[in-house]
Amino acid sequence: MSSIHASIAAALDEAARKAVAVSQFSSAGTPFSIEDAYRIQAMSIERRCQRGERRIGIKLGFTSRAKMVQMGVDSLIWGWLTNTMVEEDGGSVRLEKYIHPRAEPEICFLTKRDIDRPLTLLEVADHIEAVAPAIEIIDSRYEAFKFTLEDVVADNCSSAGVVVGPWSGKLDALANLGVVLRTDGRVVQTGSTAAILGHPLRSLVQASRVLAAAGTVLPAGSLIMAGAATAAETMAHGNHVSATVGELGAASFHVV
Ligand code: OOG
Ligand code: MG
């Protein structure tokens, strides 16, 4: 652990707290490795926890081709979700909390057992209590929403907000559900849950692997966001944003 990493963690934490973007670090004179990026991420989450925030789960990023193409990045990444990131389904999202937020349609899982080792595809369903349609609000702390893989990992993978729709036990239906993102009723993105690593349950296999590699146990009752099935869309004042995921239903919010 170096003081440079700690100061990058502090700068990213401040950028998120004040909703003011910063310049990239890894591509602008302070190169660091992916391992260092996860150390910086852990330090910035630790700062949030010292202010009283709680970890409530994790999110995966770049589990679909649509997202990799949009951001020009091609490795699966993961970051933490905390309690202050939760926005109410059907409620109002305050634009001023964010820098340049984007919305993307996702699937959220609720765990019913600790995830404490790499799981197989056959085992993952036994660890899940429920599934819900969801919207992730991503908000890169970097200017122009541009980053390298290392920078975005250090920035907790752009995690900023989560809106979780109705929970159900419909795990068997997940293979190929239609995904539709709407802004003010207009369809802005369409896709399929099959775009998420071929099957959203595979995101749980990946989640269990990255957690094990990090030596972290994810406690029962945690959320896991599987990663967006489509590209993300910018949000503006007054927008109504909704994501429908086949028979799982929809999650939505109003931007104020
Ligand atoms: C990074 C986060 C990617 C996803 O669902 O693929 C992500 C970003 O695009 O800013 O959340
Ligand atoms: Mg996402």
Image (cartoon, rainbow, N blue to C red):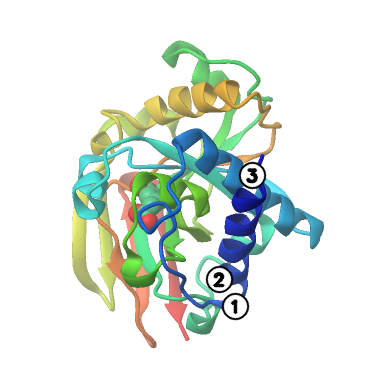
Q: Position of residue 192 (x, y in %)?
A: 23, 42
Q: Nearer the viewer, residue 71 or 119?
A: 71
Q: Nearer the viewer, residue 126 or 81?
A: 81
Residue type, numbered disc 3: Ala
Above or below residue 1? Residue 51 is below
Determine whether, in the image, residue 240 is placed left or right of residue 94: left
Tag 2 and tag 1, C-beta contact below 8 Å: yes
Above or below residue 181? Residue 235 is below
Q: Which residue is mark 1?
A: 18
At horizontal 72% and vertical 50% (from top left) the residue drawn is 46
At horizontal 28% and vertical 66% (from top left) the residue drawn is 233
Which callout, 1 or 3, points at the residue further toward the start of the chain? Answer: 1
At horizontal 76% and vertical 54% (from top left) the residue drawn is 49
At horizontal 28% and vertical 73% (from top left) the residue drawn is 183
Residue type, numbered disc 1: Lys
Above or below residue 202? Residue 158 is below
Determine whether, in the image, residue 221 is placed left or right of residue 61: right
Circle number at residue 42: 3
Residue 109 visible, this angle = no
Circle number at residue 15: 2
Which callout, 3 or 2, points at the residue further toward the start of the chain? Answer: 2
Disc 1 to disc 3, how far (Cα)?
19 Å
